[in-house]
Amino acid sequence: MNPAAAELWPYLMLIIVGYLPNEVWRVLGLVLARGLNEDSEIVMWSRAVATAILAGVIAKLILFSSGALDTIPIWVRVAATVCGFLGFVLIKRSALAGVLIGLTTLVVGGYLTAH
Amino acid sequence: MPVPATYDSSSAAFLGGARRAVSSVFFPVMMGTYIGIGALAHDFGLAPWWLALSTIVVWAAPAQVILITAIGLGSSMIEAAIAVSLSAIRLFPMVVSLLPLLRGPGTRVRHLLLPAHFTAVSMWMESLRHLPGIAPERRIAYCNGLSVTFMSTAVTFGFIGFYLARGLPTVFAAALLFLTPMSFLISTANNARMLMDRLALVLGLVLLPLLVYLEIGLDLMWTGIIGGTLAYAVHRLRAAAT
């Protein structure tokens, strides 16, 4: 590959591998959502599917981590998730409290298991 | 039902959306997530401006992580494109369920182009929660204010993460990567007011590892279709019973 092509390669990847396969779902949603109202059955079903996919992404990021997160044992990651969630439920349903408790548990657990 | 919030002008609604973004739980989460992604981009040898551009045109953290990893590791383009597209399926039902809230009597498709592109977990959650309380004719401006603020924050903190990357100890880098699933989980639970939403959340969490364990391909897609449909079916059955 000549230098100019090597320089442009990541930008080409960005459009072809990043932008297009990602954006197609938004455009599809835009086209197919015409004329639907917020209580219609297909919108309800779509919301349930979106929530389940999001839950799947969450499970994937926690259980099958990559990079630096993979250096933390899986049971520490799961325990941190449970602690964070319990913190959220018990402390007046404060999302920020839950997130902070989860992060703290992960850092402390990660530090203790590494030493 | 409370009286909808009215704004005198579109720009007031835009600012209202921007203020909602800044006070949202996703605001600190967005900072943390994009610091993490900035660090990742640095590790894989991508330019900071490339990252900024990818945040603007892709605007989906999971897809960006897949893309950065694929370029960095030199994976095949086809494989990476399929992975990105699978991670983005969730955007389809999000757009479908969001647009009816934004569409008023005089709304043209071109007014919905930007909100459709801006659709991402953070903006979708805040919109679903707050748009019903906004006067219908101001919802698009409100939504754009919300989204532009989130996106600017993401771009800014991508740069910060990129330049922070050199000095961050592993356990803190791990914590930054953990921020995304932890906050997604809590905000989804927070928004799940109906039994259907809660059921979809629990089913998704259980189904994904099960499908990965069974080595069924396209696990994310099947998690959504099976989990979502089951949750919806229970909702329908209960509605029919009452």
Image (spheres, coloured by chain):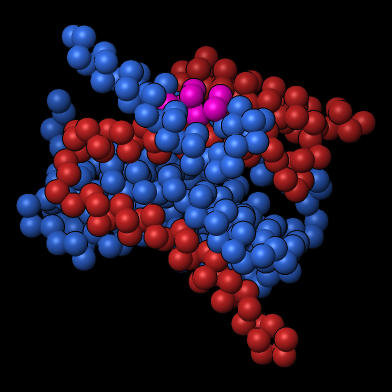
The x and y percentages for residue A52 are 45, 33
Q: Is residue B104 above or below residue B224?
A: below
Q: Residue at x 62, y 59 (%)?
A: B79
Residue B192 in sight from this viewpoint: no
Q: Which chain is blue?
A: B
Which one is nearer the viewer's eye here, A108 or B202? B202
Residue farthest right in this picture: A115
Image: B61 above or below B201: below
Determine if the magenta segment contains residue A77. no
Specify the colour of chain A. red
Question: Is B136 on the left or on the right of B21, as rendered?
Answer: left
Position of residue A115 in the picture relative to residue B174 (left or right): right
Q: Is residue A65 above or below residue A98?
A: below
Position of the C terminus of chain A, as image quadrant, is: top right
Residue beneath the point at 68% across and 58% down:
B69
What residue is shown at x 48% (from left), y 24% (from top)?
A: B203
Q: Position of residue A18 (x, y in %)?
A: 53, 64
Provide the residue span drawn in magenta.
Answer: B200-207
* Main secondary structure type of the part rendered in magenta: helix
